[in-house]
Image (cartoon, rainbow, N blue to C red):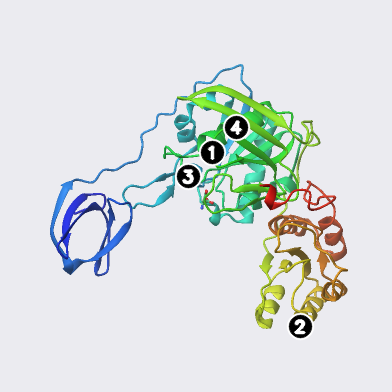
C-alpha cells in the first residue's frame, strides 16, 4: 500500500473507506470519506483492500501566454500563500506550489483586464516570511514598476499586512502596487482567488491610484473588493473572505466585478480617497534591520522575559494595554533599555484608537523612561516601519523623528472615524 492509494478496511467491526496518507509509529493515517485525517492502530486494522492505486493529482497546466496587446502591461509577482496553493489529495494538506504561470492558466479571465508580466519571487506560506525577503520583494517590484503600469503581488494572507507596510515605506511609488491573496486555495471551486486576482490586476492596470494597497473581498460573498491602504490594514478573521479590514480609516477604493463562466460582464472602480493618486514618483528606499522585535504585554508578564526581550533587540515595538500601558514595575527596564540605545515604541493592543502618553500616570512615566508613543499606528505597521527606519538610522532621536513622520498614511489625523461596529 502506497500513500494516495484508495483503500477499504475494517476497524472494530466497522467498515472504513479512505485514502492512505502515511504510517506513523503504531498507526496508519487515512483521509476518510468525511474528509478527516484519522490514525488507526495497525494491529486493529483488518481485511485491508486496495480499491484503486495512487492518483497523483498535480494538475497539468500548459502556459500559453496569449494576451491582448491593447491592455496595460501589469507586473504579476508571486510569493506564495494559499492563492498559490492546492489541496494535496495525497496528504490532505494544503501545499503552496502553484507557480505564477499556473495562476494565469487557472484564471484565464485575467487576460481580459491586463497583460501580466510574470515574476516568481518565492513560493512560501506567509507565516514563513522574513524581513530579508521583504527586501527582495521590494527590489523585484521596483524593477517591474519601471516597465509596467502597476504591479500585483500575490502573497499569503497571514502576514500580508506586514509586507504591505514594509513595501509602503520601502517603495515610494506613483503607480499602484496591489497585494492580494486568497482564503481558499485556487484549485477549489469556492476559492476567492479569481475575484481577488482580477480586481487587483484591474486596480494595478487601470486605476488612477498610486501607492501600496491590499485588495481583497469586501464582504463574504463575491462581487465587491475593497482596496485598503497598505499601512492601515489588518487580517481580522482566520477564515472569512473579508478578513482584511481598514483600521481607523475607510478603504481607498472598491472594485465591483461581475463574472460568469469565465467571462467578465462588468468591472468598475469607485475611488473613495483620491489623495493616493497616480504620478511619476519612483524611489526605492530598501532598508532592513532584522534585529527589531514586536511584543505584546500581558498581565503578569515576567520581568526577566521583558528584560531579555528588550535587551536582545536594537529596537522594540510594544503592544501595550489600552492607551499603551505596561505594568509599572517594568517601566525601569524601559529606562535602562533606552539608556542603552534600544528604541522602545508604544502601540496599543486595542488595535482601534490612539495611544496616549498623558492620560494616565503609567504612560507619563513610560514616556519619561524614553518610550515613544506612536500615535495610532498599528502594531504590525509600527514593527515593519521600525525594521525599515533602523535599517538606515541608529540615532535614537532621529529614529523617533522618522517613526513619528507620516510617510505612507500610517498615522491618521484623527482616530475613531470608522469602528468595528460599522463593518
Ligand atoms: N497560511 C497562509 C499564508 O499566509 C494563509 C493564506 O495564504 O491565506 O500563506
**Residue name at image x 56 percent, y 31 percent:** 198
Please tell me whether mark 1 or mark 2 is closer to you in this view: 1
The secondary element bearing badge 1 is classed as loop
C-alpha span from label 1 to label 2 = 48 Å
Query: Mark 2 sits on what residue?
Result: 329
Query: Mark 1 sits on what residue?
Result: 221
C-alpha span from label 4 to label 3 = 17 Å
| Neighbour tally class for label 4: few under 14, some 14-19, many 20 plus, Cα within 10 Å | many
**Residue name at image x 67 percent, y 77 percent:** 299
Query: Mark 4 sits on what residue?
Result: 199
C-alpha span from label 4 to label 1 = 14 Å
The secondary element bearing badge 2 is classed as helix
Which is nearer the N-term, disc 1 or disc 2?
1
Kindly indicate the quadrant of the structure image that contains residue 78: top right
Residue toward you, 172 or 195: 195
Please tell me whether mark 4 or mark 1 is closer to you in this view: 1
Which is nearer the N-term, disc 2 or disc 4?
4
Amino acid at each position: 500500500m502506497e500513500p494516495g492509494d484508495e483503500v477499504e478496511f475494517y476497524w472494530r467491526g466497522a467498515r472504513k473507506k479512505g485514502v492512505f496518507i502515511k504510517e506513523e509509529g503504531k498507526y496508519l493515517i487515512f483521509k476518510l470519506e468525511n474528509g478527516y485525517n484519522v490514525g488507526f492502530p495497525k494491529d486493529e486494522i483488518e481485511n485491508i483492500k486496495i480499491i484503486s492505486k495512487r492518483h497523483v493529482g498535480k494538475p497539468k497546466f500548459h502556459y500559453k501566454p496569449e494576451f491582448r496587446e491593447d491592455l496595460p502591461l501589469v507586473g504579476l509577482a508571486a510569493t506564495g500563500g494559499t492563492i498559490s496553493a492546492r489541496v494535496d489529495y495525497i496528504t490532505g494538506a494544503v501545499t503552496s506550489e502553484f507557480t505564477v504561470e499556473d495562476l494565469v492558466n487557472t484564471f484565464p479571465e485575467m487576460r481580459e483586464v491586463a497583460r501580466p508580466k510574470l515574476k516568481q519571487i518565492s513560493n512560501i506560506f506567509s507565516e514563513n516570511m522574513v524581513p530579508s525577503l521583504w527586501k527582495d520583494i521590494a527590489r523585484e517590484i521596483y524593477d517591474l514598476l519601471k516597465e509596467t503600469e502597476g504591479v500585483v503581488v500575490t502573497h499569503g494572507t497571514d502576514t500580508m499586512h506586514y509586507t504591505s507596510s514594509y513595501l509602503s515605506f520601502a517603495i515610494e511609488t506613483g503607480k499602484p502596487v496591489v497585494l492580494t491573496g486568497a482564503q481558499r486555495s485556487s484549485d477549489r471551486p469556492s476559492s476567492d482567488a479569481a475575484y481577488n486576482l482580477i480586481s487587483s490586476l484591474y486596480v494595478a492596470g487601470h486605476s488612477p491610484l498610486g501607492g501600496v494597497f491590499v485588495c481583497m473581498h469586501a464582504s463574504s460573498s463575491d462581487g465587491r473588493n475593497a482596496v485598503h491602504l497598505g499601512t492601515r490594514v489588518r487580517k481580522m478573521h482566520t477564515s472569512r473572505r473579508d478578513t482584511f479590514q481598514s483600521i481607523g480609516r475607510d478603504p481607498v477604493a472598491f472594485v465591483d466585478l461581475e463574472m460568469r463562466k469565465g467571462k467578465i460582464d462588468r468591472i468598475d472602480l469607485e475611488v473613495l480617497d483620491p489623495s493616493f493618486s497616480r504620478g511619476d514618483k519612483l524611489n526605492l528606499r530598501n532598508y532592513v534591520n532584522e534585529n527589531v522585535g514586536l511584543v505584546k504585554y500581558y498581565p503578569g508578564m515576567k520581568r526577566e522575559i521583558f528584560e531579555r526581550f528588550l535587551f536582545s533587540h536594537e529596537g522594540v515595538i510594544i503592544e501595550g494595554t489600552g492607551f499603551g500601558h505596561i505594568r509599572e514595575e517594568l517601566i525601569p527596564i524601559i529606562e535602562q533599555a533606552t539608556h542603552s540605545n534600544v528604541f522602545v515604541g508604544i502601540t496599543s493592543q486595542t488595535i482601534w484608537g490612539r495611544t496616549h502618553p498623558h492620560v494616565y500616570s503609567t504612560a507619563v512615566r513610560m514616556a519619561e523612561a524614553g518610550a515613544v508613543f506612536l500615535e495610532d499606528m498599528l502594531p504590525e505597521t509600527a514593527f515593519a516601519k521600525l525594521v525599515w527606519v533602523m535599517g538606515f538610522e541608529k540615532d535614537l532621536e532621529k529614529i523617533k523623528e522618522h517613526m513619528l513622520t507620516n510617510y505612507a498614511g500610517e498615522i491618521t489625523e484623527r482616530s475613531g472615524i470608522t469602528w468595528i461596529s460599522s463593518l
